Image: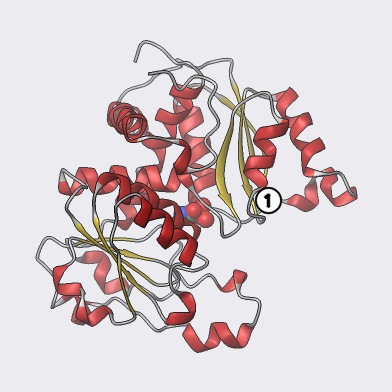
Amino acid sequence: MSFYDKDVVSIRDLDRKQIDEIMKVSEKMVPYAMGEKRTKVLEGRILGNLFFEPSTRTRLSFESAAHRLGIDVIDVSEMSMTSISKGETLADTIRMVDAYCDVIVLRHPHEGAARLAAKFSENPVINAGDGAGSHPTQTLLDLFTIKRAKKKIGGLNIVLVGDLKYGRTVHSLIDALAVFGANLTFVAPETLQMPEDNVDHIKRKGADPYLTDKLENVISKADVLYVTRIQKERFPDPSEYNRVAGKYRIDNEMLREAKKDLVVLHPLPRVDEISPEVDNTPHAKYFEQAFNGIPVRMALLYMILGGEGL
Ligand code: CP
């Protein structure tokens, strides 16, 4: 199956077979991502890393993934440093960057920006997060982390907690988890529950999610607890943020009710939704999850740019 020259704008663009293939190639990339093996298999290629919204993990792991494959990187990490600040459109900016590189990675505050970029770029575009829209490469690394930790995805009880309204990582993740046949529970205050459109979409894929605001009622059955930050920057009204901030905090007391082999994930950054004391428990897999961004993004770049021989 060829991934050559493909855009990755939404996880919905990928089918189960394609995701399985990415997982397989990601596994092969682990020793390279760790620096145990070295390659220059994509030497001479250029990645345009455009980040018009803050990022630590996605931007740096794409950059690291590129370097591990021998790819050069040109990058922008602030909109104010580009000619967009002089009034240039995103479409024109993308046309320019397209001419300077072989693949574009784009993070943008507006939902739909990556789809628009893909329309104007001849070269493939990878969505690194578009507003409250989606974050498909985060989903791929989340799936990879769950698969590595639990050896399967289908049939697992996966509880997603926090800001399910504005959190783009969960919007992408539930689409994939539904395809894999996981049992889904959404825990959030009513005002931050999973949007109806997203719920309807996964129901059409055969999922039957349970929605609640009470984590304490569902934590004992969870195999995976996926915690998310309340997305302060996306709240139109700061007083609404203050009402819901700090509602869920995972600490060792809360985890006393959990299965021994519960895996706790978080796309990060965290604020105070996971207490640092959890970091030292066997449940904590979120730093491993963040590392997995490198092999998974290496796999994507390798497949999209037509790498061969690894
Ligand atoms: N998980 C994630 O997207 O983190 P960054 O915002 O730091 O890239």
Q: Nearer the viewer, residue 115 or 33?
A: 115
Whole-percent x, y for residue 59 in the image: 55, 45
x and y percent of residue 154 in the render? 20, 48
Q: Residue furthest right?
A: 86
- In the picture, measured across the screen, residue 175 lies left or right of residue 197, that is left
Residue located 57% across and 74% down the image: 232
Name the foreground residue: 288 vs 146: 146
Task: Choose top left, top right, bottom left or bottom right for residue 21.
Answer: top left
Task: Tell me the quadrant of the picture where the N terminus can be found.
Answer: top left
Image-quadrant location for residue 101: top right
The three-letter code of the residue at mark 1 reads Phe
Residue at image mark 1: 52
Q: Residue at x 71, y 51 (%)?
A: 78
From the viewer's perspective, is residue 303 above or below residue 189? above
The residue at the far left in this view is 260
Quadrant where the C terminus is found in the figure: top left
